[in-house]
Amino acid sequence: MLAFIIRRVLQSVVVLLVVGLVAFSLFRFVGDPVDNLLGQERTIEDIDRVRSELGLDQPFPVQYFRFLQGVAQGNFGVSFRQGRPVADILAERAPATLELAAVSALFAIVLGITLGVYTAIRRDGWLSNFIMTSSLIGVSLPTFLIGILLIYVFAVELGWLPSFGRGETVRIGWWTTGLLTESGLKAIILPAITLGLYQMTLIMRLVRAEMLEVLRSDYVKFARARGLNQRSVYFRHALKNTLVPVITITGLQLGSIIAFAIITETVFQWPGVGLLFINSIQFVDIPVMASYLMLISVMFVVINLIVDLLYFAIDPRLSASRGGGH
Amino acid sequence: MDDVLLSVRDLVVQFPTRGGILTALDGISFDIKRGEVLGVVGESGAGKSMTGAAIIGLIEPPGRIAGGQIHLDGERIDNLSMDDMRAVRGKRIAMVFQDPLTSLNPLFTIAEQLVETIQTHLNVSAKEARDRAIALLDDVGIPAASRRIDDYPHQFSGGMRQRVVIALALAAEPDLVIADEPTTALDVSVQAQIIDVLKRLCSERGASVMLITHDMGVIAETADRVAVLYAGRLAEIGPVRDVIKDALHPYTHGLMGSIPTLAQEDDRLVQIPGAMPRLTDIPDGCAFNPRCDRVFDRCRVERPDPMPHGTRQVACWLYDEQQIKAAE
């Protein structure tokens, strides 16, 4: 088990190095940050001075190496645009994104599994058919459109919920949370649904398909033949077997919830890291962009590791065979 | 006939399909006495497993019992509500399935599965349920039961898993155990042991067994009586000894002829020509008539119902008393 974790962590480091490299090479084509920093009235001397201050006059491999060196020491560099350490800016913004992602993941998982199990058990009921049909809408509509539609209905027409921002926040240490104030809770509903709807329908359809498969299995038949009650057959014997493949997809989906938060944050002007990233691109703020991408990939890697560990927790057959990753 | 435990009368099971209604079981009647082992034989698709599924009330939808009655201990059970039937399953009628590798839930320990089953039907504490479970595993011949009870199914061999399955089936002391090809998926060397365990435990507990198999050897050694099914109908039923020694129905006769014996001198086994008809095109009259070597006109138009003949019942016009009288 420990060997497995260590191996996965080492693999993860390689993944992160590659992500950093790709990100860094892409940034060379985004534009020249010096243009934005100095404006129209710059002289060639100014440009050279800023360039060497920021280390941009160094060759590409040296820049990349310096960045890595900094990251290894917990120093993500200084934002070109704001002139503040990137680590501070990210720490300021991350709670908003993480809360949004957590709430929409919760929404997607709870509702997805519940509806998936329901539509599998009542396979031919009219409500199941209705849910299945409407879930197609969730799968096929693009995120920004869902966001705009929700804003139109619930913010513009009904006026129940705010259309942008995070509401009031409360500070707990360095973490700011919007989940403890009424306006904060109201503000998170629409973005969370927007972000989680696609994942929710995906999880639901997956759970349903897996559940139907499991309900046909011999051990479910045998459980029924032993007279176990419905609740136990469905939610103990069937659901646990359904979860193994569902966890894989859900894990990957959680990663993309954080990544796709960019679009939702833009639509709802949610002050998270996604919005920060979009703004940074406009200003070619390379340290911010690079750190953001590193942060997202760290999250992906961590989630994947957790998913792999969850397999061991759920399926006893794996601990016997000593699984070695994918 | 007060020692009859299970009585099945004119059981009809149908499946509505796009091409019309399929009749999987067509008027099956038989009894199982208390403590008796009834063997059920027939080709694949003859309706052996369907009969078991109908009795325990687990026919896969859209299939349904379309006619007939099933009585357990004098009480009608084929029309019970879901909840009432659930109390019968496991508690009074248990089932052992064919494949022990897939019958056990891979994600739960043997203890969890046994204790849950025991506590569903018997009002005992978790501790008592666990003690009972260990005793059961001991009974079915699992070595070091008190230690192995916390293992997962994948840590057992196929034969051991089938023993666990039997323990699960017997957990609530049922009156009837339906064993649906319990040894088909096992090694030949293990088959006899499993049948042994099943037979011994059931007779110790006074439980009846309905043993579904296509292995006549198993039937000959284990069953008291045997029912032969063909195309969803009962061809012949009677004491095993009589049926094996002197099969009445031409189909049973052919079935017995296809068992290899040591004394046999021919190189080839006897084979019944043709194949069992599909449920969609069962011929008029006797379902076996196109393959029968003793067929006559009446078989092609009139369907024979099981008629008594000595210790047995046989659905064949050859044994119609009036017919025999007329011939004399």
Image (spheres, coloured by chain):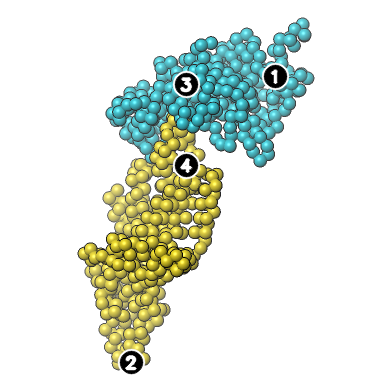
Chain colours: A yellow, B cyan
Find out whether the residues at labels 2 and 1 contact each other: C-beta distance under 8 Å.
Answer: no
Label 1: chain?
Answer: B
Amino acid type, residue under disc 4 in the picture? Val
Task: Tell me the residue at 43%/62% (across/down).
Answer: A194
Task: Tell me the residue at 73%/26% (across/down).
Answer: B284
**What secondary structure is found at the residue carrying circle 3?**
strand
Nearer to us in this view, B170 or A176: A176
Q: Earlier in the sequence, mark 4 or mark 2?
A: 2
* The label number, if any, that marks residue B176 in the structure image: 3
Task: Using the numbered discs, state the Cα–Cα distance from disc 1 to disc 3 in whole angstroms.
Answer: 30 Å
Q: Position of residue A126 (x, y in %)?
A: 55, 47
The answer to whether one can see residue A137 in this image is yes
- Label 3 neighbourhood size at 10 Å, few (<14), some (14-19), many (20+)? many
* The label number, if any, that marks residue A214 in the structure image: 4
Nearer to us in this view, B295 or B177: B177
Q: Position of residue B204 (x, y in %)?
A: 40, 16
Same subunit: marks 3 and 2: no
- Label 2 neighbourhood size at 10 Å, few (<14), some (14-19), many (20+)? few
Relative to residue B227, is residue B105 depicted above or below?
below
Q: What residue does disc 2 label?
A: A42
Amino acid type, residue under disc 3 in the picture? Leu
Amino acid type, residue under disc 2 in the picture? Arg
Label 2: chain?
Answer: A
Q: Is residue B324 left or right of residue A174?
A: right
Amino acid type, residue under disc 1 in the picture? Pro
Q: Is residue B273 left or right of residue A82?
A: right
